[in-house]
Amino acid sequence: MAKKITVIMGSPHKGRTLNVVNRFELEIKKLGEVDFEYIFLNIADLKECRGCGACLEKGEEHCPLKDDRGEIFNTMMHSDGVIFATPVYSLQVTAQLKKLLDRLAYIFHRPCFFHKSFLPIVTQGVYGAKDVLKYLDEVARFWGFKTCPGLGLTVAWENPLPSEEEKINHEINNAAERFFRQLNNEADPIPGLKEVAIFRSVRAFHSTNGGMAPDHRYYQEHGWLDSEYYYPVKLSWYKKLLGNWAEKQALKQAEKTNKEKEALRL
Ligand SMILES: Cc1cc2nc3c(=O)[nH]c(=O)nc-3n(C[C@H](O)[C@H](O)[C@H](O)COP(=O)(O)O)c2cc1C
């Protein structure tokens, strides 16, 4: 069956970044059956986060803003792979993409994109793509995605020289190959020490009253309050050991915080 890729296009116009993604699409389609859907954030009805925190504290269904956020999320959830594409603007992602990340910030608390692949595509004039790729990779990992090393390209303002064009083609082809391989690899990544430690300390927090109610419910529903990781995985003894230690430290901290809160209530 064809794999489905959703492109979240962060550029505010049909410019260089779209051109790169379209070329990437042509290349990956040479490797096998892949369907593409584009979401252009510049024309989506997406309002700016007001910072009320309702999505975090009560649940995302309590967000007071009514717009395309839910539909964008559902499209991502019904994909095998997601691409965030953005030019570097002022050393960061575009405002259009950042707006979406903020509106979906509750996913940092309740990750949901496990078993799905992620690729960031970033274009720059001179400098900044490396850090933006790293940033998007980190966001996607927190959200549960299997991340694929991103495609970062320096795109000339005017017509590129033949040698520049050759380099760009080469990098697009390589990225298409690695993303295609990842899309067709069913295996979930083995978490590193940092990821195990984060999982165990966050879940310790959610297992106590210190956690926010919807997060606690979410962890409980997914069986994460007593699992080794978000999904079944064989962990080495030292990752288990570090995980146990991280969880104990987090529990101690949560206990201390709870005591202090209770004392204030008396
Ligand atoms: C407002 C603005 C800010 C930019 N900031 C950067 C930057 O910080 N670093 C950089 O290397 N290029 C920067 N650029 C250049 C773009 O990243 C580059 O031309 C990109 O390929 C444009 O993609 P687009 O056509 O999809 O907008 C900037 C361009 C604009 C319009």
Image (spheres, rainbow, N blue to C red):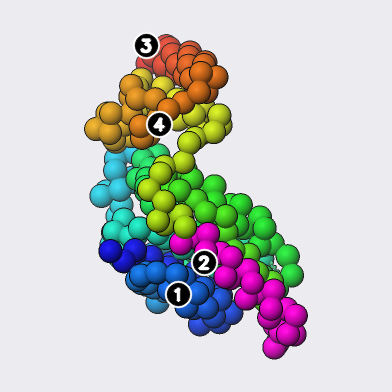
Front residue of 263 and 255: 255
What segment is highlighted magenta in the picture? 156-180
Q: Give the residue pinned by disc 2.
A: 176
Quickly name the residue at label 3: 266
- Residue labelled with disc 1: 30
Crowd tier of the residue under label 3, counting other residues whose Cα lies within 10 Å: few below 14, some 14–19, many 20 or above: few
Q: Amino acid at mark 2?
A: Ala
Q: With respect to residue 195, does 124 lie above or below? A: below
| Cα–Cα gap, marks 1 and 4 | 33 Å
Provide residue 138's location: percent of width, then percent of height.
54, 47
Question: In this picture, is 231 found above or below 50?
Answer: above
Residue 257 seen anywhere in this rendered image of the structure: no
Question: In this rendering, would 123 be left or right of 75?
Answer: right
- Whole-number angstrom distance, CA of label 1 to CA of label 2: 9 Å
| Main SS, magenta residues | helix
Identify which amino acid the numbered label 4 is placed on: Val
Q: Could you tell me if the residues under marks 1 and 2 are in contact, i.e. CB atoms within 8 Å?
A: yes
- Tag 4 or tag 1, which sits nearer the N-term? 1
- Label 1 to label 3: alpha-carbon separation: 68 Å
Q: Disc 1 or disc 4, which is closer to the eye?
A: 1
- Do we see residue 191 in this rendering? yes
Name the quarter showing ligand 1.
bottom right
Q: CA distance from mark 3 to mark 4?
A: 45 Å
In the rendering, which numbered label is found on residue 233? Answer: 4
Residue shown at the point (62%, 61%) measured from the top left = 92
Name which residue lies at 40% across and 44% down.
187
**Label 3: element kind:** loop
Instruction: Look at the image and tell me in which quarter the C terminus lies.
Output: top left
